[in-house]
Amino acid sequence: MKLFKLHHVAFAAVAALAVVAFGAQDAKAQSQTVNYTASVTVQNTFTVANTTPLSFGTVAAVSDTTLGTSQAQIVLQANSGTAAVTQGVGNTSRLLSIVAPTPGVISISAAPPSTALTITNGAQISLTNPADGTAPGFFFTPSAVGAGFSSTTSATGTLTVNVGGTLTTKQQVSGAYSDGTYTGTYAVTFAF
């Protein structure tokens, strides 16, 4: 009878261990899913300001009266500010500087940092005198370049661009320009 009890106790112990082991396999870990927000802000535009307007100064101007002949021109270097004047063949067209020209300055900010920008100059335009609609004016071709010939923005996303270009007289019948300020709107495109 003792033997039966020991055998019964041993069987009961093995059964209890089996239940514990089986129960351990059925137990599942607790989990929790948490949702968070991801975002991105797009800013493809940046700030562009014309801090110094381009000016070819003050000139005395005479245009050649014959279509297709040589016209006088001023080439203003954007970075150095130096200007080279070329008179028309035989001085039939002339530009004489009275007040020196000044390159334009464009300031860029809030652009991507340390990024090379492509600078594309716009097409040739006409500068006209709004006070005299009959005057033919001048041709102007812009030439914008990064200051120091660098077109890469700073670590804070800024860039200074200098604007020069070529001013050319236009053919007109009288050859004489009326006094006044001749203006026009030119374009420069910046891209990254």
Image (cartoon, rainbow, N blue to C red):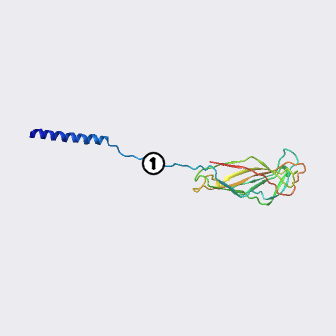
Residue found at the far right of this picture: 174
Give the labeled residue for mark 1: 34
Circle 1 Cα neighbour tier, 10 Å, few/some/many (<14 / 14–19 / ≥20): few
Please, which residue is most extreme toward the left here? 1
Instruction: Report the residue at 20% width, 40% height from top.
Output: 14
- Placement of the N terminus among the 4 image quadrants: top left
Residue 171 horizontal/vertical position (percent):
85, 48
User: Quarter of the image holding residue 153?
Assistant: bottom right
In the image, 137: left or right of 36? right
Q: Nearer the viewer, residue 173 or 181?
A: 181
The image shows a total of numbered marks equal to 1
In this image, 103 relative to 87: left or right?
left
Q: Residue 34: image x %, image y %?
A: 45, 48
Type of the residue with mark 1: Val
Element type where label 1 sits in the image: loop
Residue at the far front: name it.
1
For the point 27% across and 40% down, which residue is it? Answer: 22
5 or 116, which is in the foreground?
5
Please state if 120 lies on the left or on the right of 31 as rendered: right
Q: x, y (%) of residue 53? A: 73, 57
Pick the residue in front: 3 or 126.
Answer: 3
- Tell which of 25 and 51 is nearer to you: 25
